[in-house]
Amino acid sequence: MSIQHRVADVITQHVSTGNKIILALSGGIDSVVLLDILSRLSLSNNNVVAVHVHHGLSAKADAWLAFCKQLCQQYQIQFFSEHVHLKSLDKGIEAAARQARYQALAKHMERDALLLTAQHQDDQCETLLLALKRGSGVRGLAAMPTTLPFKQGILLRPLLRVPREAIEKYAASKQLRWVEDDSNSETKFDRNFLRLDVLPELNKRWPGFSANVARSAELCQQANYLLDEIAEQDLNAIQLTHDKLCLTLMAGMSPPRINNVLRMWLRQFDLAMPSQQVMEQIVVQMLQAKDDSDPVIALGAFSLRRYKRVLYIVSEERKLIHNTFSWALSHPLSLGEGMGELVATDTKDELALRKPRVEEQVTIRFAIPGATTSWPIGRDKRRTVKKLMQEYHVPTWQRRLVPFVFYGEKLVAAVGLWVDKDYTACAKQQAIKVEHIG
């Protein structure tokens, strides 16, 4: 099958009348070949555009942008450019550039749009070898899928089964012009090192090596789909809420199955996936530690914690503005970044908190002394706040975030937990309900 027919076959499986087609156009040989093939397909009913991302990393970046713009004018394809600035380089310049590129391309996505990128078979081989270098599991070895959900549409790689050699032959046969990125010859970058120094030798020794590795990546993708199906079933069985898992049910699973379901759960929070060493620590500290221990495992902006055989993932971004707030009740009270607000509304519930008297100043306090006492409605005696937190099953790390309502110096309620019996609304008294929103 010719390269043109192979690309057409991939695209026509996903394109429908009227949906937008976006080509990521770098100006290199791969994306130029894809542009040429795209221009020869019968896509007159579709909105076809090309987008060039200007990283500003090369002195030739402006010339590349001008080349892409001129090329699209030649093909009569609408052209857009996006200028990006790399911010965090913690994971290397290649990773930062890739992240910035996809963020820029995402701006042009709309419902059911197709984003076409020009990665090919040799790129797939390089990606799998880099995953091996990192010690990745099946998900990493699956490398790049041909299709992937992306924003409101689909990311499509029509050249993924096409070797670089076939792309070069096509470009020569059509007398195409393209730009060369000087950095592609710098073997200090891992991918260039594989492309220039390693893979030529491997393919010389074992012809078809790159194609075979790419096929292995496809087999890993199939295995990964199966693992995800199992993980989804397991997650449905052990997930109590979005941020809580039942450790008792998880303990009955095999270690590989525990790792599998934990990774699926953590992916929902857009986390950098923990290393195998960290995963082992999660199992040891959360599943095997004594019930009265209070382990904490930091995961970026989140942490994992355990309380009464339940595993929690907790955002570390919630911050109180103050520990004490004065409140007039007539307006919502903002508590700080990620902490939401308190709202007081009138209610006819006989067990609700009575409205404060004129002389009673209302304050909201956090992290109050554990020896402070209260007598919740329905309880047989007064207890300390420390004891009540245990009886209401409030996890230890959440206790500092519980808003306590005071009238003067009297504790009258713990928002979302209890109202003190001495401060409930009696007959003819107006009552309020205090709620924590967000």
Image (cartoon, rainbow, N blue to C red):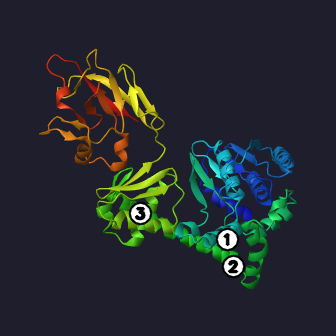
Q: Is residue 73 left or right of residue 155?
A: right
> What secondary structure is found at the residue carrying circle 3?
helix
**Of residues 309 and 389, which is closer to you in this image?**
389
Amino acid residing under circle 2: Phe
Residue at image coords 23%, 43%: 388
Check contact, mark 1 vs mark 2: CB within 8 A. Answer: yes
Find the distance from the CA under tag 1 to the CA under tag 2: 9 Å
Name the residue tied to disc 2: 209
Name the residue tied to disc 1: 125
Name the residue tied to disc 3: 261
The mark closer to the camera, 1 or 3, is 3
Seen from this angle, which residue lies furthest left?
A: 380
Q: Is residue 254 left or right of residue 358?
A: right
Q: Position of residue 427 (x, y in %)?
A: 14, 19
> What secondary structure is found at the residue carrying circle 1?
helix
User: Quick check: 335 above or below 236?
Assistant: above
The 10 Å Cα crowd at callout 3, few under 14, some 14 to 19, many 20 or more, is many
The mark closer to the camera, 3 or 2, is 3
Amino acid residing under circle 3: Val
Q: Quadrant of residue 370?
A: top left
Find the distance from the CA under tag 3 to the CA under tag 2: 34 Å
Residue at image coords 79%, 51%: 57
Q: Is residue 114 left or right of residue 270?
A: right
